[in-house]
Amino acid sequence: AGPCDLYSAGGTACVAAHSTTRALYSAFTGSLYQVKRASDSTYLVITPLSAGGVANAAAQDTFCASTTCLITVIYDQSGHGNHLTQAPPGGFTGPESNGYDNLASADGAPVTLNGKKAYGVFISPGTGYRNDATSGIATGDAAEGMYAVLDGTHYNGGCCFDYGNAEISNTDTGAGHMEAIYYGDNTAWGTGAGSGPWVMADLENNLFSGANVGYNAADPSQSSRFITAIVKGQANHWAIRGANAASGSLSTYYSGTRPSASGYNPMSKEGAIILGIGGDNSISAQGTFYEGVMTTGYPTDAVEASVQANIVAAKYATTSLTSGTALTVGSSISLRATTAGYTTRYVAHNGSAVNTEVVSSSSTTALKQQASWTVRTGLGNSACFSFESTDTTGSYIRHDNFVLLLNANDGTKQFYEDATFCPRTGLSGEGSSIRAWAYPTRYWRHFDDLMYVAKEGGVDTFDATASYNDDVSFVISTGFA
Ligand code: AHR
Ligand code: AHR
């Protein structure tokens, strides 16, 4: 059985079932998600390898070879047509044209399920999915359940990495107009034990960690790589639950009456579905979504126990985030541009600016050092890398507003993540392309001899489509210095 078969058997059927990694019904053979590739703007629908099985990631890899792909649709497997697509502007506007949010990279969150490769939905700040015209989703004070499987290590304090029920207007229509799973370490509203991240409930104008507005000691900080997060609600009763999605069983962090703060009892749910954003299209959060559902009716703890067992049996596990030229931590490298006319230029720095310079064996020692980088374990993710300056030790290449800079490590999580890059085989077929860990749609690119993390076809001039693949492909060699 799949998770939604278990909910159905319990009398609380799925009315939305979203996953880019697997079928959520044992008989499901239909569309899981759709990707769009940049090279020719064509689309591919990904289906399970077999009924009830894992997504056909190999089909995506073939379709997206030597180009970049975005996830355009996350289909609803429940038959209610509650598909998730690029979120439109609302109280906040997204960074894409016409104020839409960004779409996620199709290969930003690789994992394996029972050893088979699949891809989750890696939400960077600015990325979001939504459906404002749903069918079967709870409205008003009606009961519903939700679970989501998330990356417990990918989060931030921005508002709001959510999955669940939100406003149909994309704007904040007041307390009680949302009921969504939240994951992260935002402290503006609720908090739990420790420093987070926490599973909380976004009920609009507040993230709740339990009975009290603000702090609730029973909501623990999460530390697992894979997290099962649950929020469910019915008339004057709701709950937050969670587990390690790779082993063990669910714990209940809160189960009780609705908040006493005004507006949450009864609830005024509107029935839109959001992923990765707040109800008003707040776009500051990050996180990774693998699968999740919304039910009609309030699922029992027993049904959720069987769903958790099903998730554990799916055996989510990590897999490599890198490919291309092998990098050795502690070694010195130089990176040469491959675009015709620029092949004598290397990634270098001039003060805090990261640029390209013509460098050769007869260059000055100072220039050779400016064009040499020490490979370090990724400050923000040890599966990837950071690049420390040779002449300015303690300073690393990081992106800021998508411009590469050489900055001193300030010890913050933001810096660590901005300074973490995951190289892969060059998009052009030559060398390596250096992907921003926190923005997997973006790669190091030289543009007018300055360096950026550029998204093919994005809104900035340095995102230009022309010569993108060559501009993001660098030949890595032993460092000049
Ligand atoms: O409830 C927290 C957030 O507040 C909601 O997601 C958003 O709509 C509002 O800004
Ligand atoms: O480069 C994109 C973002 O810009 C970085 O993550 C952040 O530091 C800055 O706001």
Image: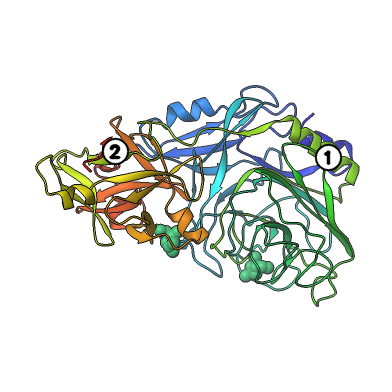
Q: Quadrant of residue 212?
A: bottom right
Q: Is residue 286 above or below residue 147?
A: below
**Quadrant in which the C terminus is drawn:** top left
Q: Characterize the local packing of mark 1: few (<14), some (14-19) or many (20 or more) Cα atoms within 10 angstroms.
A: many
425 left or right, relative to 182: left
| Closer-to-camera residue (114/393) | 393
Residue 41 marker:
none
Judged from this view, the residue extending furthest toward the bottom is 262
Q: Amino acid at mark 1?
A: Tyr
| Closer-to-camera residue (398/279) | 398
Judged from this view, the residue extending furthest toward the top is 50
Task: State the residue at coordinates (79%, 75%).
Answer: 263
Q: Is residue 39 above or below residue 219?
A: above
Mark 1–mark 2 distance (CA, rounded to whole Å): 47 Å
Q: Position of residue 65 (x, y in %)?
A: 39, 30
Q: How did the renderer colour the structure?
A: rainbow
- Check disc 2 and report its element: helix, strand or loop: loop
Q: Amino acid at mark 2?
A: Ser
Residue that numbered label 2 is attached to: 473
Is residue 22 at all visible to an observer of this figure? Answer: no
208 left or right, relative to 86: right
| Closer-to-camera residue (364/354) | 364
Residue that numbered label 1 is attached to: 7
